Image (cartoon, helix red, strand yellow):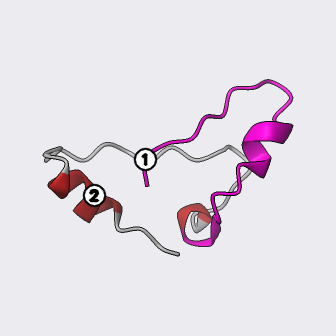
């Protein structure tokens, strides 16, 4: 399921866009293929990943 981040920001009143941050090993299509299963968050050895909006 793809989420329109620009629409989500508009509906939340966040008119200025912020750069999207992805895990360092991920590609440009990360948000398109992410199923939000949280597996990457649970297996991150440094525990630096957290669930974001979208």
Q: Look at 54% across and 63% down and name the residue there.
A: 31
Vertical position of residue 17 compared to residue 6: above or below: above
Residue 6: where, in percent of width, then height?
Answer: 27, 61
State the separation of the CA atoms marked 2 and 1: 8 Å
Quadrant of the snapshot with the C terminus: bottom left
- Taking the image as shown, residue 20 lies to the left or right of residue 4, namely right
> Which residue has dot 2 on it?
8
Residue 44: where, in percent of width, then height?
Answer: 81, 35
Q: Quadrant of residue 50?
A: top right
Q: Quadrant of residue 28?
A: bottom right
For mark 1, give the secondary structure: loop
Contact between labelled residues 1 and 2, with CB atoms less than 8 Å apart: yes
Where are the magenta residues, as a range? Answer: 32-54
For mark 2, give the secondary structure: helix
Q: Look at 19% across and 48% down and name the residue there.
A: 12
Vertical position of residue 32 compared to residue 51: above or below: below
Front-most of residues 36 and 29: 36
């Amino acid at each position: 399921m793809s989420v329109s981040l620009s629409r989500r920001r508009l509906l939340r009143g966040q008119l200025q866009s912020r750069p999207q941050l992805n895990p360092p090993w991920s590609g440009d299509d990360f948000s398109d293929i992410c199923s939000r299963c949280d597996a990457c968050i649970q297996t991150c050895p440094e525990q630096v990943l957290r669930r974001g909006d979208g």
